[in-house]
Amino acid sequence: MPPRKKKERASAPAKMGPDVYIENSGVVMDQAIVDTLEKNYMPYAMSVIVSRAIPEIDGFKPSHRKILYTMYTMGLLNGNRTKSANIVGQTMKLNPHGDAAIYETMVRLSRGYEALLYPFVDSKGNFGKAYSRDMAYAAPRYTEAKLEPICSELFGDIAKDTVDFVPNYDNTMMEPTLLPVSFPTILTNSNVGIAVGMASSICPFNLAEVCETTIALMKNPAHDVATTLQAPDFPGGGFILYDPEEMRRIYETGRGGVKVRARYSYDKAENCIEITQIPPTTTVEAIMDKIVELVKSGRVREISDLRDETDINGLKLTIDLKRGVDPDKLMARLYKTTPLEDAFGCNFNVLIGGMPKVLGVAPLLLEWIAFREECVKRRIFFDLTKKKEKLHLLKGLARILLDIDKAVKIVRETEEESEVVPNLMIGFGIDEIQAEYVAEIRLRHLNREYILKRTQETEQLESDIAQMEDILKSPKKIQGIMEKELREVAKKFSQPRRSMLIFKSEVSEEGGEEEIPDYPVRLFLSKEGYFKKITPQSLRMSGEQKLKEGDAILEELEATNNTHLLVFTNQCQVYKCRASDFDDGKASQLGDYLPAKLGMDEGESVVYLAATADYQGAMVFVFQNGKVAKVEMSAYETKTRRKKLISAYCDKFPLCQALYLQEDRELMLTSSGGRVLLVHTAALESKSTKNTQGIQVMQLKKNAVVDSAKVFCEGMLSNPHRFRPKSLPSQGQFPRGEEEGEQLTLS
């Protein structure tokens, strides 16, 4: 099928002023949609990937780099703090995305926000908190900032041609393409970004461990990273559930998940739990919302109060307990049902040479080592060039030492200033650069003592130059310099681990599930959607079931209090709950209205209720067009306690009846034309796909539909063999007089 094209439309040329017209204005040209995507969307996607969302080998995205470099050029590495608004304004010379975006990026780099393990911005004022959704940062006119001391390791060699510089967006100034970082910042701070079609999520590691691992990889590229790099280290602390296999997978592939749980303490005197550290992927408000939801739904009954006591001293979430509650068991349950335990998804996607690559820890550090080696080489070559230039000048100066008077005489007797340099070149046999240097010497320095002092540096310079040239020829010596710098960085800026490790074997699973009393119950569902859970004792003492006028009992099931309930609706959705979620009722009560209790969508009503304890058996869906779908009950089982599943059954045809069968049974289908068909569900292939269309079982005449479907029991038909087909699909049979009477009486 050819690509669709835009419709061509012509209009009169646009008029610009009294006599000016734009040719072809108002004409919509034909263009294939694939060409539009290629010309317009693909460049945008590449720009987001390469210039916005994915970090580079120096550990920074372009927005981070522009802010930090601007602050460096403002003298904020060693100077006093300045207003954040000033920093934002200066950064706009490099970053044209607007002041709000720049300031938000600077906030995330700050110490006050607490999102980075090793922050780069020394902040003063309200910068918000990473662990709070509602604690907003103040406007830039109220806050101040400067660079942290660790930034000296980002810019130490930037003036020595260690990295390339490019013009900014309007070609008015230059900015670095990368920062010559002296330690692997790519792994020491968290970096998360979403591009187009890909994303990056890098967890932070302890600086001392990263430096030690980098040194070990320089000495042996086959070094086992897991022996020196324990696990991630998050700025918010918490406990890492250490899984050696998962950690090794992250180290090898750059993908995986790290489970982090909150840290708490129990105050026996106040009978409360105090949570002081939470996972990096959540906020205090999200945790509180989830706990409140659990309390309101009755799934957690041990909590009497919950409050956020975060203050200037840091995060603090207090949970007041009821009398006699075991805090450890309660926290074990909260870990499983709230964001107090969450997973940080790792995706080590980094731009290497402008290309996004997902790398493990070792390959990523080896790429950084190669990058840093190039920076060190360029720095040494820069210093070498400067020393060679100085040596060259001093050698020219040494020639004057032979005859200072001659130099003075040449300068004095030269009639034109432009001839001074050429005459010195001829008189002493030196080149133009040396002659220019000699000609610029002040008159007071034309003495033997000054010239001797300057020329004594020659031997030291020659020694330094020889040493530098030797280093440039030896990769081992360059790595030795890098090792020395890494050890110095680790010594100056390392800090103890904040995230402690807990091995899975040490984690107690006790209390993970609420202990729910189990006892027999009888479940009732009415056509209007009212649900009752009644104990057998109460049922024996009750009279008739109370129902709304015009309502009737649709289903009556025997179950237990721990039974799982699956409520299927007319919108092809299923709501999952437990019988224990409902209070024990009486026949004299209307019961719980399921659409309201389960939070159903507007216009949604209940069509069937299934009760299961082990998700064995199958759901059978009979559609009005004669098709029947058999879906394994296990397809509705989920690892997490999800309350709602969409596409619970096929929505392409109207549903006649849903049935839950723990084992294969025979079904009796009756069409609107009066035909009857018996089919055994063993003849139907069970599917794990919930919204399968099923197979055609009953062939129907025009305008006929399947009217009813029920489990066949002996006695419903006097001669059932006539209605069992030899093959499917089948039209079924019309009941004879005596069979029809039997069916009508017993059905």
Image (cartoon, helix red, strand yellow):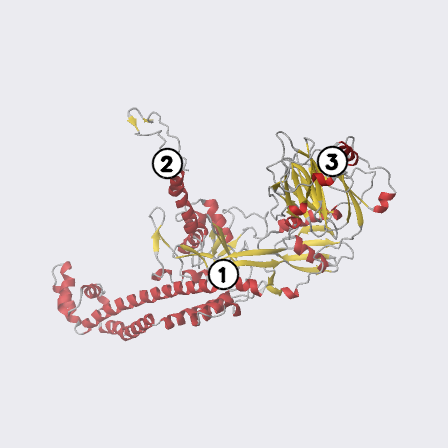
Distance from the alpha carbon under mark 3 to that under mark 2: 56 Å
Identify which residue is drawn at 57% across, 65% down.
244
Which is more N-terminal, label 2 or label 3?
2
Q: Secondary structure at mark 1?
A: helix
Residue 597 seen anywhere in this rendered image of the structure: no
- In this view, the residue in front, 11 or 453, is 11
Identify which residue is drawn at 54% across, 53% down.
113
Q: Amino acid at mark 2?
A: Gln
Identify which residue is drawn at 48% across, 48% down.
103
Q: Is residue 417 left or right of residue 481?
A: left
Mark 3 neighbour class, 10 Å CA radius: few under 14, some 14 to 19, many 20 or more: some
- In this view, the residue in front, 211 or 73, is 211
Q: Secondary structure at mark 3?
A: loop
Q: Secondary structure at mark 2?
A: loop
Q: Amino acid at mark 3?
A: Lys
x and y percentages locating residue 150 in the rendered image: 47, 62
As drawn, the residue found furthest toward the right would be: 541
Which label number is shown at residue 137? none
x and y percentages locating residue 55 in the rendered image: 45, 55
Distance from the alpha carbon under mark 3 to that under mark 1: 54 Å
Among the 4 quarters of the image, the one containing residue 700? top right
Mark 2 neighbour class, 10 Å CA radius: few under 14, some 14 to 19, many 20 or more: some
Which label number is shown at residue 527? 3
Which is more N-terminal, label 1 or label 3?
1
Distance from the alpha carbon under mark 2 to that under mark 1: 42 Å
Q: Nearer the viewer, mark 3 or mark 2?
A: 3
Q: Amino acid at mark 1?
A: Thr
Which label number is shown at residue 253? 1
Give above or below for 268 relative to 478.
Answer: above
